Image: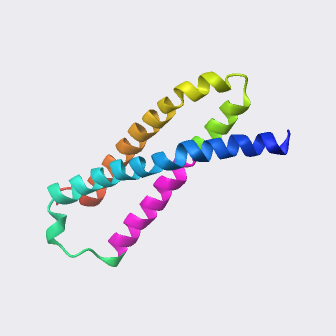
Amino acid sequence: MDGTLSREYITEAIRYWEPRRIAYNLVLAAIVAIHFFINGYYRKPISLDGLLVLVLLCVLANVAYCAAYVVDIFAQMSGFRERWREVRWLLFAVGIVFAGILTHFWSMGLFGAQ
């Protein structure tokens, strides 16, 4: 494969996915915040371990977000590149719903009623 062509696919993927990472993180943060406040955890001191778990989960959520790059670059390299560019927002939508569901259940486990 031509190096220039590879660079083009990677650059386009970064250009598309990185601005959307902000929305992804905001949605997940909102889910965590809702569980945090609904279950009254704002009244309790946060332990260092609890904070470290949240940081770890944030990092893992962003690593999972990077899976979109694999799909996107592969689809761009196919003969369906133009069609893919029109529908790749679906990958974002499915990914954010899936990540939101996982975040909901993790938040229930972390901040569930005691």
Residue at (54, 31) in percent of width and height = 88
Quadrant assignment, res 29: bottom left
Magenta span has 6? Answer: no
Is residue 25 rendered to the left or right of residue 42?
right
Residue located at (35% from left, 52% from top): 26
Residue segment shown in magenta: 49-66
Decide: is 43 above or below 78.
Answer: below
Q: Is residue 85 left or right of residue 92?
A: right
Please indicate whether residue 100 sits to the left or right of residue 108 in the image: right
- From this viewpoint, is residue 67 visible? no
Where residue 57 appears, as percent x and y from the top left, is 43, 60
Seen in the picture, residue 23 relative to 41 is either above or below; the reply is above
Q: Residue at the location (60% across, 47% down)?
A: 14
Here the colouring is rainbow
- In the rendered image, is residue 76 in sight? yes
Q: Position of residue 36 (x, y in %)?
A: 22, 59
Locate residue 42, reporting x and y percent.
Answer: 17, 67
Taking depth in this image into account, of 11 and 59 the one nearest to the observer is 11
For the point 14% across and 62% down, the residue is: 40
Quick check: 44 above or below 75? below
Relative to residue 35, is residue 70 depicted above or below?
Answer: above
Along the line of sight, the residue nearer the viewer: 14 or 103 = 14
In the picture, which quadrant includes the N terminus? top right
Report the magenta stretch's main SS.
Answer: helix
Q: Position of residue 44 (x, y in %)?
A: 17, 72
